Amino acid sequence: MKIAFRLLLLAFLSLTTSSLGFSRVAENHTNEKSLYSVALFASLEKMQTDSGRYHDYRHAVVEEDRAITDDLPTILGDFSVEYLDDNALRARRQDRVKDFQALKISPIKNIDDGLRINISVYEIGVKKRMLMFGLSEWSNVTFRYDCEKKEFVVADVKLGGI
């Protein structure tokens, strides 16, 4: 009885902790209609169009935030996204000579007559084993409710930067 319980507990723990500390690349979640997904890929497309000669936004790294990014797709059209937690970001930076870019999706906000999601672009560095986030640019995606379609649609994508 005790052995069976221990084996069951061990199996449960290995299943629940197996994804901790790893990046999410292989599986492509299918919640493409999530406003976060729409905002992320609209931002990537606009950034690629406007700044593509400086950075390639078709292959992006996004800081993992389980409340926001867990069910977002990893591939949509010409764009692919890799979601990395802090440990994976630190490991990625330590494997490189230079800092690299990662995006962060902020929680959705109510504004006047719609919703807005901010996507920030950070230069990821490490100093004394601590992750350093240097803000470089951002995208604000505004949604408005379309009564005919009965859903939120992108009203505007505005880029900004330092």
Image: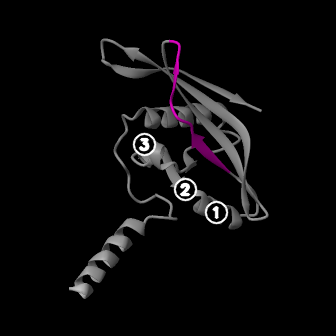
- The number of numbered discs placed on residues in the rendered structure image is 3
Q: Is residue 71 left or right of residue 130?
A: left
Q: Amino acid at mark 2?
A: Leu
Crowding near the residue tagged with mark 1, few <14, some 14–19, many ≥20 C-alpha atoms within 10 Å:
some
Comparing labels 2 and 3, the label whose residue is closer to the camera: 2
The residue pinned by badge 1 equals 92
Comparing labels 1 and 3, the label whose residue is closer to the camera: 1
Q: Residue at x 73, y 60 (%)?
A: 130
Span of residues in magenta: 101-112
Sequence order check, earlier mark of 1 and 2? 2
Q: Residue at x 37, y 66 (%)?
A: 16
Q: Amino acid at mark 3?
A: Leu
Quarter of the image for the N terminus: give it: bottom left
State the CA–CA distance, disc 1 to disc 3. 23 Å
**Residue 14 lies in quadrant:** bottom left
The residue pinned by badge 3 equals 76
Crowding near the residue tagged with mark 3, few <14, some 14–19, many ≥20 C-alpha atoms within 10 Å:
some
- Does 105 lie within the magenta span? yes
Sequence order check, earlier mark of 2 and 3? 3
Q: Is residue 137 left or right of residue 65?
A: right
The residue pinned by badge 2 equals 84
Do tag 1 and tag 3 residues touch (Cβ < 8 Å)?
no
Observer-nearest residue: 147 or 46?
147
Q: Amino acid at mark 1?
A: Arg
Q: Is residue 87 left or right of residue 96?
A: left
